[in-house]
Image (cartoon, rainbow, N blue to C red):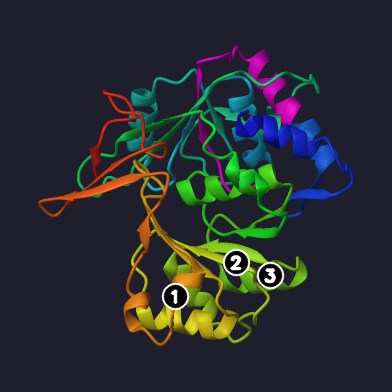
Amino acid sequence: MSYVDLVLERLSTDDDRESVIGGDTRLTRAQARDLLFRLADGLVQRGIGPGDGVAAHVGNTPEAVLLAVAVHLLGGRLVYVPPEPGPNELRALIERADVSGVVVDPAFSTRLDGWDLADLPGDPVERVPAPGFTTVMYTGGTTGLPKLAVHRSDDRWAASAQTPPMNLLCNTLITHGSGSGAARLALMTGSKLVLGPSTFDADTFVRLARDEEINATMFVPPMMYEVLDHPDCPGPQFGVVILGGSPLAPQRLRQAIEKWGPVVNQGYGMTEAMAITMMPATSVDLSRPDTLRTVGKANPAMEVETRDGDVWVRGPFVMEGSAGHQDLVRV
């Protein structure tokens, strides 16, 4: 069973329960399911089928979240286009990805031409999820040109579906690994997904955390620092806080734990190899400073080795390479 099956299963119950919230848009489960099928139909009307690539140059909106699921529902290849490059580089990246269409949200960016996300929905045609799909993400390019990291569909998310429903606030872009993962987790678990703006703003975070009764959230560390420094920083309302994406200052981790309690979870990973290590909140001991300076131990689902100072990993969260994802990959 793929995550798409799990999402449809969740959206088929408790029709009036809120599902995805962003900006002025609030979708119930029934409305989200209807929009998901209409987005898929809009893609079909434009010739998209199994194996076809669809690039998404979009921001944090409920429509964009459901667009990603719609591409996978059809068995397509979803290509997340990063927002940082200029127009010429963006077009070059799109050409490398070999896509059949580009979906854009002009409210997010006008640097690319394509199918306007607002005009995409067609008819509410219910469809059975395709057996396979692909997600492609561009790496940051910190060690050279950005790479195309390809991840195939699999059952690695099945265990996450057992997580109790939350009120989850997503702060990073859904076209990045952390944001897309948070959105997927929320939909699979039947949680209320609240999308922060495409450009992080601590004032907005504080307001949403209060008004939407947020009990779960995720940051990259600089975002958390802004919230901790905010005069109206929320108190201990979170059941889980997830951190990743860049090094975390030990004194800031201590500050977060003192403010919110033992709920801060960390990990180490990247676009090419996600979820390499895990540092659960229960492993942090404020009386042992060394536990504030680590990203934990190897994910039980991953094999991790060090060779001459390099880290090598193998497992289901590694991108598909030329020799397949079961080979050891140096990260």
Quarter that holds the N terminus: top right
The residue where tag 2 is placed is 240
The residue where tag 1 is placed is 284
Marks 2 and 3 close (CB-CB < 8 Å): no
Q: Quadrant of residue 205?
A: bottom right
Q: Residues within 10 Å of mark 3 (few under 14, many from 20)?
A: many
Q: Quadrant of residue 118?
A: top right
Q: CA distance from mark 1 to mark 3?
A: 24 Å
In percent of the image, x 51 and y 80: which residue is there?
Answer: 257
Can you give x and y, in whole percent of width and height, for residue 317 in the image? Answer: 41, 40
In percent of the image, x 37 and y 71: which residue is there?
Answer: 248
Find numbered disc 3 in the image and state the secondary structure of the residue it sits on.
helix
Is 24 or 141 nearer to us in this picture?
141
Q: Quadrant of residue 266?
A: bottom left
Can you give x and y, in whole percent of width and height, for residue 165 in the image? Answer: 73, 54
From the viewer's perspective, tell me whether residue 276 is left or right of residue 120: left
Find numbered disc 1 in the image and state the secondary structure of the residue it sits on.
loop
From the viewer's perspective, tell me whether residue 272 is left or right of residue 123: left
Find numbered disc 2 in the image and state the secondary structure of the residue it sits on.
strand
In percent of the image, x 36 and y 79: which residue is there?
Answer: 250
Q: Is residue 69 above or below residue 16?
A: above
The residue where tag 3 is placed is 209
Q: CA distance from mark 2 to mark 3?
A: 13 Å
In percent of the image, x 68 and y 23: which residue is there?
Answer: 40
Mark earlier in primary sequence (2, 3): 3
The mark closer to the camera, 1 or 3, is 1
Q: Of the residues shown, which amino acid type is indicated by label 2?
A: Val
User: Is 130 one of the magenta-colored residues?
Assistant: no
Q: Of the residues shown, which amino acid type is indicated by label 3?
A: Ala
Mark earlier in primary sequence (1, 2): 2
From the viewer's perspective, tell me whether residue 232 is left or right of residue 294: right
Q: Magenta span covers which residues? A: 36-62
